[in-house]
Image: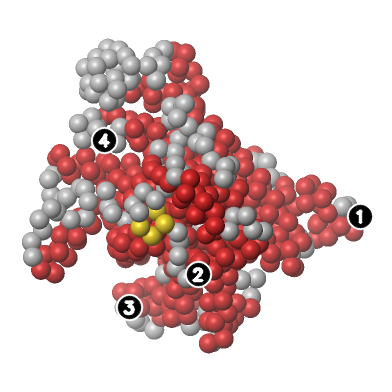
């Protein structure tokens, strides 16, 4: 094992993003048990995060039906301030498009890309981490070298190169984020599998003749879930920030509206029209914040001992 | 000790080689003719140039030969040419490297110093308002897109408080002499470095707080207190040294993310560094420059990781390189 790996472990125990500590209040059965749920619900910040996220998802899903301005339509004079026009409550951008409609409509792209990217991160990260942690030996060394390599690439820059070389579309953007953001999950999964693989109940499963695939899937994986659920929540926030960053740099899907893209397109006018960048930015902020609050809440609920740290 | 340092350096060189191979792979898996990918849109209109590139890169030869010649060229510092700027990618990058290093270094120094201070202060009084404030700040800092934070600061400082410059890294006429030069750059540096440093300040304060709380409960700290040392000495002399180790760890691990953040911050503040260069080359489809920036940035991360590892042995004599590489 390399030294960088050792550092990964230290970080796993200390970082909010990476709770390398095992099962919590529910006795380790993956699904949030009653005790975990109770602790989570009692945590005001976490509940605020859930409420915030429900609000944002509602705005994204139902908003376009209630508020029927199309974010791509020009509805009024460019660069009018918020509150000046009835047809564009939050003002208009440099082309005269409705900022409020953009804030409502932009969520779909951000959330879809983030969800697809997070799914990809989880699939890659969990597969590599599980193989490395379960089998150990040369496979572990090889996979960890591979992971290390991806960790030295500056993630956003690598994603920029990938999207720039291929065409920017929702698929390539999700793919690029997925390719650059998985090493953290791989390390957490590996640490959990390493911890669990020689425990008695895993050895028992092996003794009764269960195949490796079955042990990984049915015995070890469910017990490795709590830290992964926390990380998955936080990965959603990271993916949204990545998507916003890429779109801001002009590497968003040009056919859709997204919060990052709105800020990027209005970068030339933000001194005269602060509203054209402020509101989309607030939307990103609150979305990521809601995921962070939920992630922290889950972490505390799974590991009550770590509370407040 | 020397041998383990050599092994660690060899590992870093291996990673650099891997980055070269990745760059080569990227040129080849991208749809379209590799020659067009290399010259980008700015040079693709010229058939003679494309022929030249094909000959230069040996694109008709076996892939493995191409890879070897590519690695050989990059290893000697030849990253190709920018057909937009009509000069070598290496010289372009060297011009832009210093501003990025300055920005990242300042932001990092600020974040580590201020973050550790806040972390220690809050660990000593975990229930104080400052402590809760720091927790909230860490959450807020993590959730704000860094380019947006930058834009908000630009709006604030360009319209409300006209205290600091918000664009570029030099005024048009900044006076004669070295001092005037340094002061001028320093003044321009404040806002970008603050933008970039704030997120990490929040994270490091949280991290050093957590590790400080743990260290303060340890036996040797109790012993130090029992000996009757004053609290300041216990905290700053005895506990801090151990509490700061996780911060060093995370600085090393996050250096790539920090560099990525710097790219975004540079485009907001028109800071003439690598990020600005990467952004401009995307707009111009100047692929060779973009790949060159990826190469150089990855090498920067690898070097930063190497330095972090060496720093460990200074901060914590218990962690010897030999043991770490044999774990």
- Residue at 56% across, 76% down: B10
**Numbered disc 4: what chain?**
A
Residue on which the image places disc 3: B233
Can residue B174 be seen in this snapshot? yes
Pinpoint residue B210: horizontal percent, then vertical percent.
45, 61
Vertical arrangement, residue A242 with respect to residue B273, above or below: above
Q: Does the CB distance between marks 1 and 2 fall below 8 Å? A: no
Q: Residues within 10 Å of mark 4 (few under 14, many from 20)?
A: few
Residue on which the image places disc 1: A209
Foreground pick, A106 / A302: A106
Mark 3: secondary structure: helix
Vertical arrangement, residue B316 with respect to residue B34, above or below: below
Name the front one of labels 4 and 2: 2
Inter-mark Cα distance, 3 to 4 = 52 Å
**Numbered disc 3: what chain?**
B
Mark 4: secondary structure: loop
Inter-mark Cα distance, 3 to 1 = 59 Å
Asked if badges 4 and 2 are on one and the same chain, I answer no
Residue on which the image places disc 2: B75
């Amino acid at each position: 094992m390399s030294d960088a790996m050792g550092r990964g472990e230290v970080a796993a125990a200390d970082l909010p993003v990476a709770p390398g500590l095992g099962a919590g209040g529910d006795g380790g059965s993956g699904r949030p048990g009653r005790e975990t749920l109770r602790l989570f619900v009692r945590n005001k910040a976490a509940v605020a995060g859930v409420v915030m996220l429900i609000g944002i998802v509602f705005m994204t899903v139902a908003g376009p039906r209630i508020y029927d301005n199309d974010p791509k339509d020009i509805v009024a004079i460019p660069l009018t301030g918020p509150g000046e026009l009835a047809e564009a409550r939050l003002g208009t951008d440099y082309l005269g498009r409705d900022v409020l409609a953009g804030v409502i409509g932009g969520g779909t792209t951000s959330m879809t890309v983030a969800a697809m990217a997070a799914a990809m991160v989880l699939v890659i990260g969990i597969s590599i981490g599980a193989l490395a942690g379960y089998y150990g030996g040369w496979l572990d060394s090889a996979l960890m070298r591979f992971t290390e390599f991806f960790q030295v690439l500056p993630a956003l820059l690598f994603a920029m190169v990938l999207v720039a070389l291929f065409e920017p579309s929702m698929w390539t953007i999700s793919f690029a984020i997925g390719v650059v953001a998985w090493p953290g999950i791989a390390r957490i999964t590996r640490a959990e599998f390493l911890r669990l693989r020689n425990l008695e109940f895993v050895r028992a499963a092996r003794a009764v003749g269960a195949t490796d695939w079955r042990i990984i899937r049915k015995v070890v994986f469910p017990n490795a879930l709590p830290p992964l659920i926390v990380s998955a929540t936080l990965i959603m926030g990271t993916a949204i920030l990545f998507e916003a960053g890429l779109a801001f740099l002009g590497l968003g899907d040009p056919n859709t509206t997204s919060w990052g893209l709105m800020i990027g397109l209005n970068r030339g006018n933000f001194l005269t029209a602060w509203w054209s960048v402020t509101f989309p930015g607030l939307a990103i902020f609150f979305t990521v914040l809601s995921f962070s609050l939920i992630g922290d809440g889950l972490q505390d609920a799974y590991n009550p001992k770590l509370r407040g740290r | 000790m020397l041998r383990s340092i050599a092994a660690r350096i060899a590992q870093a060189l291996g990673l650099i080689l891997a980055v070269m191979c990745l760059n080569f792979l990227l040129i080849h898996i991208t749809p379209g003719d590799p020659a067009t990918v290399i010259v980008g849109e700015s040079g693709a209109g010229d058939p003679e140039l494309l022929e030249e590139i094909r000959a230069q890169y040996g694109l008709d030869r076996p892939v493995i030969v191409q890879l070897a010649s590519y690695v050989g060229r990059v290893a000697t510092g030849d990253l190709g040419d920018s057909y937009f700027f009509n000069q070598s990618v290496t010289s372009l990058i060297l011009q832009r490297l210093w501003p990025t290093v300055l920005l990242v270094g300042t932001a990092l120094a600020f974040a580590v110093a201020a973050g550790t201070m806040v972390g220690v202060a809050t660990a000593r009084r975990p229930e104080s308002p400052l402590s809760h404030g720091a927790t909230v700040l860490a959450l807020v800092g993590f959730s704000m897109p860094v380019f947006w934070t930058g834009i908000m600061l630009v709006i604030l400082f360009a319209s409300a408080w006209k205290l600091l410059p918000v664009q570029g890294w030099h005024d048009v006429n900044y006076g004669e002499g070295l001092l005037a030069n340094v002061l001028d750059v320093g003044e321009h540096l404040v806002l970008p470095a603050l933008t970039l440093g704030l997120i990490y300040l929040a994270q490091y304060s949280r991290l050093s707080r957590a590790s400080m709380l743990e260290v303060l409960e340890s036996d040797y700290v109790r012993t130090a207190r029992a000996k009757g040392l004053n609290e300041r000495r216990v905290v700053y002399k005895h506990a801090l040294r151990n509490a700061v180790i996780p911060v060093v760890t995370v600085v090393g691990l996050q250096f790539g993310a920090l560099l990525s953040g710097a790219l975004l911050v540079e485009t907001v503040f028109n800071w003439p560094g690598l990020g600005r260069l990467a952004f401009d080359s995307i707009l111009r489809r100047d692929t060779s420059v973009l790949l060159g920036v990826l190469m150089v940035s990855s090498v920067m991360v690898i070097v930063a990781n190497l330095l972090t590892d060496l720093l460990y042995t200074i901060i914590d004599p218990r962690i010897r390189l030999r043991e770490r590489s044999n774990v």
